[in-house]
Image (cartoon, rainbow, N blue to C red):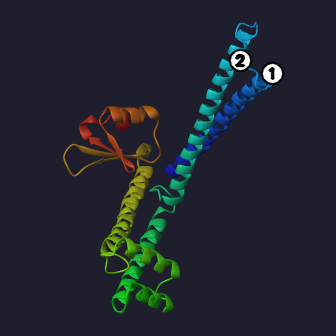
Amino acid sequence: MTQRERKEAKIEKRMEWAESRDRKANAAFEGVRKIADNIPLGQPILVGHHSQKRAVRDQERMQSGMSRGVESANMADHHREVADGIEHQLDTTIFSDDPDAIDALTAKAARIEAERDRCKMINSAYRKLDGDITERLTTLVKSGVMTDSEAMAVGRMFSLCPYEKQPYPSYHLTNLGATARNARERITIVNSRNQHIKAAQDSAGGVLIERGERQNVCRVTFAEKPDRDVLTALRNAGYRWTGASWYGALDKLPESISE
């Protein structure tokens, strides 16, 4: 199961929990309503009357029911919020084990680099103009260098940061460059991951065991996720999972993995 599939399963489970909590909340509120329907509107507890005990008991049951209902309703909202957060992550994240991860990362890096180059072009055009900020931005919009929405955003930035000398500060360009560079570095990591998994698929038992460059360092890669007892043995031996492989001491490699 891929990371995306696991997160999709988490969304489904959260929505099931939310629906269950909704049913509990509705049942609790319905119970309170039924009790309240049997009490005359505005009827106080008649102290000393034979109905006092039942009235007190009904009041306690209503308070308890409302508390349970509110708690369940709040938990239902919580589960839906968590599900929405995971869904947003799925929409905005490229996972290393996505089938199209390399293509998606390549496109992301190219898109960000194009955005950075455009920002540089706008900065250059802005510096060549005379006049105040409004006049320069208006000229850039009329000439098609910037859009109206971009000019408005830049105008707000200048009003908040009057010390800036160009539409897109240097730190903004640096951040764009770093984000694009990280995407391209991930391409290398994903390629390495895929190569190791392919090698594991071609290895005996679907397991690739490699000695690291340093003495007594071992890397273990599985073609498919192994059984829980195998993972437990690796953890107990001090191995740690990074990327697509497990890393640890070669002399502590569990016998079950060697076999």
Q: Quadrant of residue 61?
A: top right
Residue 230 placed where, x, y %?
41, 34
75 and 66: which one is in front?
A: 66
Identified by mark 1, the residue type is: Asn
Pointer 1 local density, CA inside 10 Å: few below 14, some 14–19, many at least 20: few
Residue at 37% in and 71% down: 160
Identified by mark 2, the residue type is: Asp
114 and 118: which one is in front?
A: 118
Q: Are marks 2 and 1 in contact (CB under 8 Å)?
A: yes
Is 217 placed above or below 150 here? above
Mark 2 or mark 1: which comes first in sequence? Answer: 1
**Mark identifier at residue 121:** none
Q: Quadrant of residue 53?
A: top right
Is 93 placed above or below 61 here? below
Measure how far apart labels 2 and 1 are at the Cα level: 10 Å
User: Mark 2 highlights which residue?
Assistant: 58
Residue 217 placed where, x, y %?
24, 45
Q: Is residue 196 left or right of residue 225?
A: left
Residue at 69% in and 28% down: 28
Identify the residue at the far left of this view.
215
Question: Considering the image in quadrants, where does the C terminus appear?
Answer: top left
128 and 164: which one is in front?
A: 164
Residue at 65% in and 18% down: 60
Q: Secondary structure at mark 2?
A: helix
Q: Is residue 43 left or right of residue 239?
A: right
User: Mark 1 highlights which residue?
Assistant: 38
Pointer 2 local density, CA inside 10 Å: few below 14, some 14–19, many at least 20: some
